[in-house]
Amino acid sequence: MNTLLLTFVFFLIQLGTGLSIVALAPRELISASRLTKVQFVVLGYAIGASAVGILLGLFSALVGDLRLHLAIMISLSAFGLVWTWPVWRPRTGDARQIMLWLLLALPLALVTWWWTFGAFSSFPYSDIGADVHWMKTAQEYADSGVVNPYASQSYVDLRSALAGALAGTCNLDLLHFGWTYRYVSILFFLLAFYAFAQGVYSDPSRKWIAFFFAGAGNGIGLLTNGSLAVAGSVVFLGVLLGKSGQDEKEDLRAGSVALLILSAVTSLFLAFMLNNNALLLALLAVGLLLLRLQGKAHRRGSLLFIGCVWPATLLLAHRGSYLHIPAVLGAWLGYLLILHEMSRRPARTLSLLRALSIVLPLALGAIVASVVAMRLGYLPAANANAIFSHITGLVLGRTIQSGDELFLGAGPEVAVIELGRAVGPLFAICIALAMAWWWINRATASPGTASDPTQTARVSKLLWSWTIGCGLALAALSGFPFLYRTTMIVLSLLAITATEAVSQLLIDPSPASLRRRASAAFTFTLLAAGLVLTVYTFTWRPDLPSSRYQDFIRPAELAGLVLLAALVPLTLIRSRRIHVCALAAVFGLGVILDRAGLASMSKSYSYGALPAGATAVTHYNASDLDAARWLHDNLKKGILLSDPYTLGMIQALTGAPAAYMFSNLDTVNEALAKRMRTVVSTIVEPGDGALRLAEACTTIRPLLQDINQETYFQMGRSDALSGILRPVRTTKAPETAAPQATAPEVSDATEDADRDVVQNFLGAGQDTWQLVAVINPRTIEWINLGAGERLPYFPPTTQLESEFIKSLRAGPFQALYANKQTAIVRIPCER
């Protein structure tokens, strides 16, 4: 209950902080921008989620009182919530909309939470591989009262600072927080989808169907900086579409469109030139304050508010918005163009749109088929990194190198896997068939364009969402680094396609479509059942790496199929409300089953085969937790050394610094990994104790001279403000080495010289830091890996031999703690 309550406080503080920054703009200007209340709340939260981390970092650099930091943030948040209350407060007429949203969102979020996280976890064990970085930073802040500015990468993590403040003052358990945070994350995504649907539709029926389809198709279960940026981009697109409504024709003038685009491009340029998140936040606050100083609100000011604030907000969250914002602007311009052309008599571009509706999905299928053929060896592998390096060199200042983080997210194969498991085969096939059905149905009806503006807008939205959605998917499948992260935008567009296709084919002609509704629902149910039963629930070969993952969600899938079949007869009921809800439920539930089954199959892509007896997708166990808790309680100044899997988990739970850095759990520079293995080998291998200690210290000396900046700052030797103001984007490989130690360099490292270097670096007396190695069976297996080999993701099942633990206690490395699987050993190089 404490974790659940603090999770609610966590999100409320972020929302209030963002609203306090938005409150710098005049209230009349916010009203003139015609943001809906939900869109305004999403904007406030998106700003606050990034701003809280930046502000807490500044506070911790100036004042060392953690409770004071949190008190300031709570006060600032309360001010924002109260000051902007007249803008976002619910009215009497909003109660029904809120209740309907809750009735749909709460169970939908629970289902999504289950198949993305809950089904594959066993409390408190779960996959925290992607959470290691923020948890380590949060625990460090909770213990020290200082936010490590060198722990942030190209963004300020939206969880680490505030979660650390709550952990240090209110005893928030960060491991338990990950469970409740994920559920609230999905609720935020559903709020963003509703804000998007509000911008697209004024018709209540279509708005709720679009919201439900987008929520059912959502496959993102965790709110991170990247997912916040893309979710905010979806809402930004909804805001732009809302400015293009039929009741706002004055905003469709070329000057207004040009001003919006120019302001957004200017924001991108300024953010690129500033190259720092704290400075960008300051620029955003100053810009809002200047809008207030202008006095009376006017239409041009509202356009500047939308065109400048939204891009700056998204760039604060994640620099991937350099791709998201142009995609959103391009999609919006595409809608304006298609709407304009479809409003003409006759619609001259209808044949072109028909051709694109056919060519684009065929091109997508061809790319997928080519990647599969390359995967199976029928086609030679393609490498587009040389071409993409010209673009990344211009935009990011870095080319794509093998082993680089950019390389990990590049290539058509990665894009096909990521986009494929986000869209799903059932959704892709059915929406393509629906578009083909729509074109056939239109060909048998009267040719030409629609006769009234409402129908013109509906046809325009259908054709626009399909062509732009397929176009963005095609761009993502090109393999450009991380462009596949725009899949939420693609899915939102395809949700509009599904809404219009279902509405125009099955709902609008309600008296004549009774048989059509039943046949469509029955066909969709058969497709879903066939896919689930033959592929997802029951595999052809139980020895496949993905087969055991399906055991986690098999009962839920079968129950979903039974419910899906039970909903089909409801589509025959003449009541419009019942048959509309039944149709939406059938399609939404089928997509959810598709997503859940695909999630179980794709787990082997991320984690490998599930070992026998495993009850959760996790890389740690009770032994690791016990060792981490002992370290946190008994060793306040320890620098950790172990294999990357163990090291990441121990860091996350203790906040302790590491002797080396790594991006992913198994991605370590090979030369650095070789040195680390040498040190660990000297600890675990038998032999002369004095010689082993001397070899370990000789290997560690250059390692400590090149210690990473994050660890160096944590040891109290760096300037916090310099870290806060350091550039986000570098023109060369980022510096990971700290300033050189004060000891003189020697060409022939002796035992005494090694001891002097370590002593000078680690300090003395009260400031003494200790080198600590964490040893378990996985660590021992890690030191014997060859080049390019990887460890299994899951924790080891074997135990350390009692004789081995006795030898550690009797050796020169000072065994501090040991249980059945884990030993913690001090490396006393300074003695």
Image (spheres, rainbow, N blue to C red):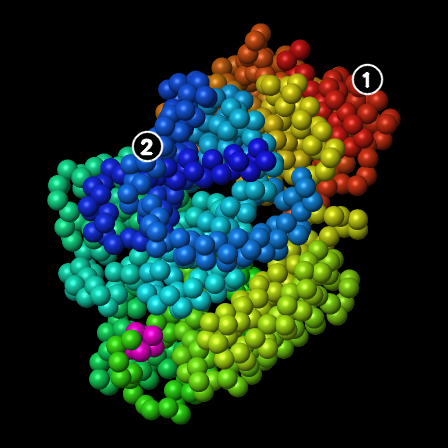
Residue 390: quadrant of the picture? bottom left
Which residue carries the number 2 mark? 79
The N terminus - image quarter: top right
Give the crowd class for mark 2: few <14, some 14-19, many >=20 residues within 10 Å: some
Label of residue 810 in the image: 1
Identify the amino acid type marked 1.
Answer: Ala
Depth order, front residue of 750/553? 553
Q: Is residue 40 left or right of residue 801?
A: left
The C terminus - image quarter: top right
Q: What secondary structure is the magenta-colored segment mainly?
A: helix
Identify the amino acid type marked 2.
Answer: Phe
Distance, label 1 to label 2, CA atoms, is 61 Å
Q: Is residue 408 left or right of residue 614?
A: left
Is 532 located above or below residue 47 in the figure? below
Queried whether the magenta region covers residue 459, the answer comes back as yes
Q: Residue at x 29, y 87 (%)?
A: 448
The magenta-colored residue range is 455-460
Tell me the element at label 1: helix
Q: Earlier in the sequence, mark 1 or mark 2?
A: 2
Tell me the element at label 2: helix
Q: Is residue 412 left or right of residue 525?
A: left
| Residue 315 picture location, percent across and down | 35, 46
Queried whether the magenta region covers residue 420, the answer comes back as no
Depth order, front residue of 61/714? 61
Residue 397 can be seen, yes or no: no
Residue depth check, mark 1 versus mark 2: number of the one nearer the observer: 2
